[in-house]
Amino acid sequence: MDVILLQRIEKLGQMGEMVKVKPGFARNYLLPQRKAIRATEENRARFEKQRAQLEANNLARRQEAEKISGKVDGLKVVIIRQAGEAGILYGSISAAHSSRRPGGYHSMLAESAAGRASSAR
């Protein structure tokens, strides 16, 4: 089945490329998640009209991700957990451990970013 990718799919192609995929992959993953559309003449024409808007949306999402990565970059998190005599943890550390802190994970990000900003002055 031929589809037009609406966004970059790793190991498949870039946005706007027409690729051939197995029908099940298209039906069960690409089409329901709106990552691709069927490659008909009508859809090709519609995609070309919407291409600029899709590229702008992808750029905005990328900039937002880079902004968030800037907040996380250099973040140091210390989580105290019980360990055995050999230093092996009794369980795994998950996102739930960071969310138990008042304010949760996002509060830690904001505090860390504020701390870096005030120390830079």
Image: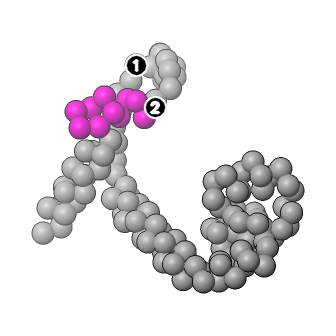
Secondary structure mostly taken by the magenta-highlighted segment of the chain: helix
**Residue bearing the label numbered 1:** 82
Q: Which residue is mark 2?
A: 94
- 23 vs 61: above or below: above
Q: Give amino acid for label 2.
A: Ser
Return the x and y of residue 117 as percentages of the image width and height.
19, 63
Q: Secondary structure at mark 2?
A: loop
- Quadrant location of residue 35? bottom right
Q: Residue visible at 41% across and 60% down?
A: 69
Residue 119 at x, y = what percent? Answer: 16, 62
Q: Is residue 100 magenta?
A: yes
Q: Locate the N terminus by quadrant.
A: bottom right
The residue nearer to you, when weighing 92 against 21, is 21
Residues under labels 1 and 2: Cα distance? 14 Å
Q: Which residues are magenta?
A: 95-104
Magenta span contains residue 67: no
Q: Which residue is drawn at the image coordinates 65% and 78% (left, top)?
A: 46
Evaluate whether residue 37 shows in this view.
yes
SS at badge 1: loop
Find residue 43 and report its horizontal and vertical position in percent. 71, 74
Q: Nearer the viewer, residue 90 or 110?
A: 110
Q: How many marks?
A: 2
Which residue shows up at 29% across the image and 50% down it?
109
Answer with mark 1 or mark 2, whichever residue precedes in sequence.
Answer: 1
Residue 17 horizontal side relative to residue 47, left or right: right
